[in-house]
Amino acid sequence: MLLIHCPYCEEERSELEFRWAGEAHIARPDNISAISDEEFAEFFFLRNNEKGLTYERWRHIHGCGRFFNAARDTVSDKFLMTYKAGLPKQPIPAAAKAEAIAEEKTIETWEQTEGDAR
Amino acid sequence: MVDFGAEIATRTLPLSGAHGGSSVARLELAAPAERISLRVVAADVAALSAALGVDLPTRPKTSASANGRTALWLGPDEWLVIAEGTGDTGSALVEAASKAAVPHSATDVSHRNTAIIVSGPGAAAAINTGCPQDLSLAVFPVGACSRTNLGKVEIVLLRTADDAFRVEVWRSFSTYAFGLLAEGARDAAL
């Protein structure tokens, strides 16, 4: 079970109490009626879906109810850091980053995880 | 004319008649209580504390009790206030909160919730059947409270003593919660 640090409850809680809430730091255009359909589609529908380090919004829905931001590695599923909503994009602490990169060097192949299916 | 006793309104708890528990974890139904869901910004907490007669806690996972009222921290601007008594004559809590001349939201949720008291040496183990939180005394001391999960439902958990917890659960989920706790109590005794 993943433990996620809630910046409002100030402690680690089980992933069961949390809900994912999409990519973080997406700024709504200042004058939304002035932008083109393509620009609107880019803002509204299109997400980066990056492999590796991503910034996401999470919600402690079965706890304090608050939305917050998290930096997560989508390969290792590791949470590198969490911080309160409203704060600008925070730099990843060096130690957490090094750990995540070390973990990514382990390449899982189909043969390793599934074995010989015959 | 047959007297149906309509003038004597009686209230039955959602879990009325439910029984369960084991030799290490006892399950009891809490008496009907008055409850409000309170939302107020940090700057106006003091005014609400004065109006309610109980200091609203501002630290995560803490509660405070005074004058028969208990305030549970649920979020940075959200509290659950529980008062002893049935509140048959309207909501004394909402009335008390309204005396504070600051913007706030106090919603009467007395009948939305019901509570189960879990007590005994196996109480924490029984709750941990469906609750992922660390309920050791060091991490979850007496007076600690938190909104969390119990299996598939959301509960508000309050530790009232070393070996006693109050589980606040929505009434429509209460049979599920009681069933899971009864199962947990049985497992804790193994």
Image: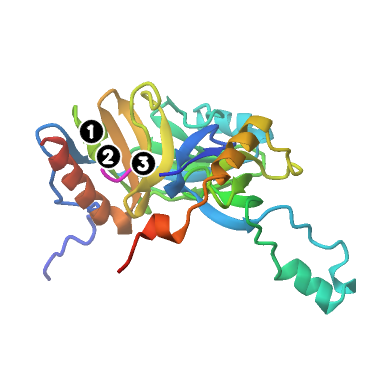
Mark linked to residue B127? 2
| In the image, residue B130 lies in the stretch drawn in magenta | yes
Q: Quadrant of the N terminus of chain B?
A: bottom left
Q: Is residue B98 visible to us here?
A: no
Q: Chain of mark 2?
A: B
Mark linked to residue B123? 1
* Badge 2 and badge 1 both on one subunit: yes
Q: Position of residue A47 (x, y in %)?
A: 69, 64
Q: Position of residue B85 (x, y in %)?
A: 33, 39
Q: CA distance from mark 2 to mark 1?
A: 6 Å
Question: Which residues are drawn in magenta?
Answer: B128-132
| In the image, residue B125 lies in the stretch drawn in magenta | no
Q: Chain of mark 1?
A: B
Label 3 vs label 1, nearer the camera: 3
Q: Position of residue A74 (x, y in %)?
A: 57, 52
Of residues A59 and B163, the one nearer the viewer is: A59
Image quadrant in which you'd find residue B76 = top right
Instruction: Give the prevailing secondary structure in the magenta stretch.
Output: loop
Q: CA distance from mark 2 to mark 3?
A: 9 Å
Image-based side of B62 in relation to B31, left or right: right
Label 2 vs label 3, nearer the camera: 3
What residue do we see at 31% from left, 36% from top?
B166
